[in-house]
Image (cartoon, rainbow, N blue to C red):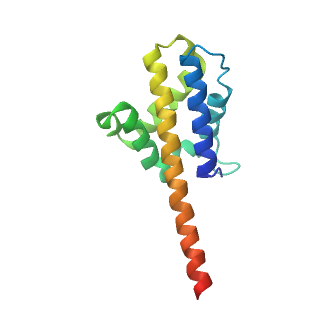
Amino acid sequence: MTSYEGLADAAFAAAVDVQLKIEGLSSSLESFQKFAKLLKEPILPESEYKLLHDARNLPLYKAAWSNTYGQRNADLKPNVLLTKIAELLCSAEVEIDNWKKEDKQKVADFCLALNRAFLEENAKTYNMSYSARAMHASS
């Protein structure tokens, strides 16, 4: 499974890709496409369960969506929210060149919000692991 640090890095690279597009600079959106593909990967080999649908990450997706699109748009049933995120990523991969600048900016903002959420989760995970090792070492 991909680490939160890896997800954060991929989300940041995706945001940079989209921002380059917004600025009219050359961007193949390769990093954005890699990030979208990463979220579509199965959690375990031979599994249909995708990383995007991992319930442990739902609060992170919800926070990022809320930061970008507003709390009202994040107060959806989990399956509806995840479908909206999947549709956004899929349509952005194919059609982002035809989108308005504001819509492209929302995608970049969403990727940055995911970056922040994944970094915070990575820090929590590291802190818990460090605390556990420290307690074990002192006993």
Identify the residue at image location x=36%, y=38%.
66
Q: Taking 25 as reference, is 9 above or below it?
A: below
Q: Position of residue 37 (x, y in %)?
A: 64, 34
Q: Position of residue 78 (x, y in %)?
A: 40, 43
Q: Residue furthest left?
A: 72
**Residue 61, picture quadrant:** top left
**Residue 93, picture quadrant:** top right
Q: How many marks?
A: 0
Q: Taking 127 as reference, is 80 above or below it?
A: above
Q: Nearer the viewer, residue 74 or 125?
A: 125
Identify the residue at image location x=49%, y=44%.
116
Q: Residue furthest top?
A: 98
Q: Residue furthest bottom?
A: 139
Q: Nearer the viewer, residue 134 or 4?
A: 134
Q: In the figure, is residue 53 to the left or right of 59? A: right
Query: Is residue 48 at all visible to an observer of this figure?
Result: no
Q: Position of residue 105 (x, y in %)?
A: 47, 23
Q: Position of residue 98 (x, y in %)?
A: 53, 10
Identify the residue at image location x=49%, y=49%.
57
Query: Is residue 19 at all visible to an observer of this figure?
Result: yes
**Residue 28, picture quadrant:** top right
Q: Taking 132 as reference, is 139 above or below it?
A: below
Q: Nearer the viewer, residue 94 or 120?
A: 120
Identify the residue at image location x=59%, y=31%.
14
Of the 4 image quadrants, the one containing the C terminus is bottom right
